[in-house]
Each structure stands twice: as C-alpha cells, then as structure tokens.
Amino acid sequence: MSDVHGNLQALEAVLEHLDGGLAVDGLVFLGDAVGYGADPGACLELLGERCCALVAGNHDHGVIGRTDLSEFNEEAKEALLWCRNRLLPRHKAFLESLPMRTVTEGFLCVHATPKAPEAWNYIFTYEDAEEALSAMETDLGFVGHSHVPLVLRQGPGGKISVVREEELRIEPGHRYLINPGSVGQPRDGDNRASLVVYDKEQEAVRLHRVDYDVHEAAVRIIRAGLPPSLAHRLYFGV
C-alpha cells in the first residue's frame, strides 16, 4: 500500500479490511505517510507498528527537509509546513530512517521509480515504463507516487503492456511493475482507499478498494486549518 498522506480514517479502514479474514503475512508501505491529511503522527505510529517494510516518499522527505519545498505545489507545501510543526521528534527520526528502496520477499519496493528514486519522477510514458522496468533487479516491483492503480507487464520480447484486470497471475518470464494506488488520497475517480494483496504461493496480485469515512477525514482537514481543497478532493477521488 502507498500514499496514506495523514488520512487516519482511510488507513484504519484498510487495516480493518486486511484483518477481517485476508490473513496477510506482512504489510509493505511504499511511501508518503504524511502530507495533505490531518493525522500524520497517528498514521506514522500505525505504519511503524504494522509494516514489515517501508520506503520513503517525496512528502516524507519534504517534511524532514531532505526534499526542497519549492518542488511542491502551494497546497502541498502548506500542508508539509503544517505537518513539520506538529510531528514529534520520534516521528521525524522514523521518517529519516526510511530507505529510498528495498527488496523484500524477492520483490522491489520504491516510491517513485526504480531508476533514480530520489528524483521523484513519475511513470507517464512508454519510455518512462521502459526505463523503470530496466532498472529493476527483480521481476516484480511495486511503486506508488501517482495515486493511480496501474500494472505494467513486460513480456520476454521486451514489449510492455498495461494490464487492466483487478486480479492477475504472475507469469514466468515476464516482469511486472505494480502501483497499488493510494490509501489516503486516490486520484483515479474512485474515492475508496486502494491497495493490492500479493499472494506469493499462488503468484497472484489482486486490487482491493475499501470504503472509509471520507466525511470525517475531510472535516478533520478543515478543522486543522489545512487548505479546504484537500478535503473536497477526497469526496471525488481526484
């Protein structure tokens, strides 16, 4: 899962969903725990308790000063400055400890792209996809950053295609780069929290969408004095 962005209501709903019978063995977080939402500290506490592997995102680095705030739009910058003044020292130390990329259980985890993850680039074009897949040291990788679920598959001949199915089988001889979407601020027109579950035994990956209390999350943003647009967009998943 990726991009919680301080949305405690969405994160708690996702954890409840996973605990409700899926019996996952471990949770992996692909970055951006903070920014936009009203509960960054509580989200960091939960992620630290529940995740077996985590990587840093650009908002995580922005709040601790490792990424210049001039690289963010005005609303994101305002939210990060608000967040910077509210996180406890232990939260900042936790963010500082996160790696840029990691390989766990045989798959790659990175927030932005496998090549030069510190540049915080997006995968928008076919060329971007080729570059990202060629930089992977594994045949399976997971990225976040765009807030939009996406599966890229590269066949043995090198051709790359976009897989539209909500569930797919990992085929031998192919490479996959998968974006689980965003838990806390989806941007694909579906306002439900988004994540994927990887079944290593069955070599299957399935997209899950989880309802949460969008109104409560939005109200908390407004009450915190954050930009109202950050609350409004939650209702529409944009």
Image (cartoon, helix red, strand yellow):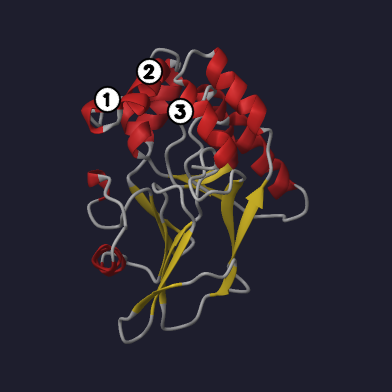
Q: Secondary structure at mark 3?
A: loop
Mark 3 lies on residue: 36
Q: Is residue 56 above or below residue 72?
A: below
Q: Are marks 1 and 2 in contact (CB under 8 Å)?
A: no
Q: Secondary structure at mark 1?
A: loop
Who's the residue at 53% across and 22% down the image?
Answer: 38
* Image position, residue 127 (x, y; %): 24, 67
Who's the residue at 66% across and 55% down the image?
Answer: 24
* C-alpha span from label 1 to label 2: 9 Å
* Image position, residue 15 (x, y; %): 66, 42
- Mark 1 nearby-residue class (10 Å; few <14, some 14–19, many ≥20): few
Residue lying furthest bottom = 157
Who's the residue at 31% across and 58% down the image?
Answer: 124
User: At label 3, which amino acid type do we have?
Assistant: Tyr
Mark 1 lies on residue: 65
Mark 2 lies on residue: 84
Q: Quadrant of residue 152?
A: bottom left
Q: Is residue 174 above or below residue 228?
A: below
Q: Earlier in the sequence, mark 1 or mark 2?
A: 1
Q: Nearer the viewer, mark 2 or mark 3?
A: 3
